[in-house]
Amino acid sequence: MPKLLHLSCSPRSDSESTAGARIFLDGFRQARPDWDIDVMDLWRERMPEFVGPIVEAKYARMKGQAFSDPQAAQFAEAERMAMRFSLADRVLISTPMWNFGIPYKLKQWFDIIIQPGLTFRFDPAQGYLPLLKDRPTLVILASGSDFATGMNRGRIDMATPYLREALRFIGVSSVSFVPIGPTAGPAEPIRTARDSAHRRLADLAKRF
Ligand SMILES: Cc1cc2nc3c(=O)[nH]c(=O)nc-3n(C[C@H](O)[C@H](O)[C@H](O)COP(=O)(O)O)c2cc1C
């Protein structure tokens, strides 16, 4: 059964990025009723802290050294998480912008799955090469500020370039972004931004 993996990255119950994801997934389920939707809530699922054997395993890999038993055991957790991602035919990431970038749980997820020999490799002649196949990926990014219309020109968005580059590094370059913002401030601009993003998401869902 083909699979869509949803990385759900907001811890809030009235999250704008999660509400956008719901709109998208409702449309997606209608368009592709035979698809399996695997939801990974990054705030509820256990992810290893990147300390001890798991970080040493990354360096062992980079130096071409064999793993110790604890390194092999912890690296297996990274393998399972990377496998869950690599088995997905489509990916949805719904996330808040936090302090100009992404929430630390999503960064932790990237730190765990971006591993040599797992999602990228290094070739002395060609440099860094991705190991995953490309797949359509949608990022719903909710921010207090308005980055969509340029009203907040000059405010910094490091989430979009980070996500684009981190995904491209491992092989995923077909990435679309749907920003939702402003989500803070006067009610009218919030409603306009939300309605416009939801319309776009409902439309994208039919042909994702
Ligand atoms: C810790 C934290 C940091 C934030 N930093 C930013 C920021 O840098 N830029 C911005 O526009 N909004 C920022 N916000 C506002 C959120 O992006 C906004 O509330 C958004 O709707 C959160 O997504 P969610 O509704 O899906 O949880 C921040 C919110 C929190 C809790």
Image (spheres, rainbow, N blue to C red):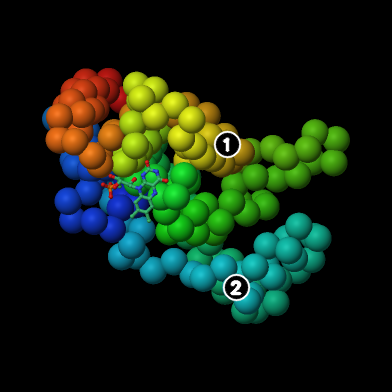
Query: Hey, what amino acid is under mark 1?
Result: Glu
Q: Position of residue 111 (x, y in %)?
A: 56, 56
Q: Quadrant of the C terminus?
A: top left
SS assignment at label 1? helix
Query: Hey, what amino acid is under mark 2?
Result: Val
- Residue linked to disc 2: 51
- Residue linked to disc 1: 165
Q: Which mark is residue 14?
A: none
SS assignment at label 2? loop
Q: Position of residue 62 (x, y in %)?
A: 76, 57
Q: Quadrant of residue 140?
A: top left
Q: Report the front residue among 105 and 191.
A: 191
Q: Position of residue 66 (x, y in %)?
A: 75, 68
For this view, does 98 lie left or right of residue 131? left
Which residue shows up at 46% across the image and 58% down it? 104
Outermost residue to the right? 125
Measure the C-alpha gap from mark 2 to mark 1: 24 Å
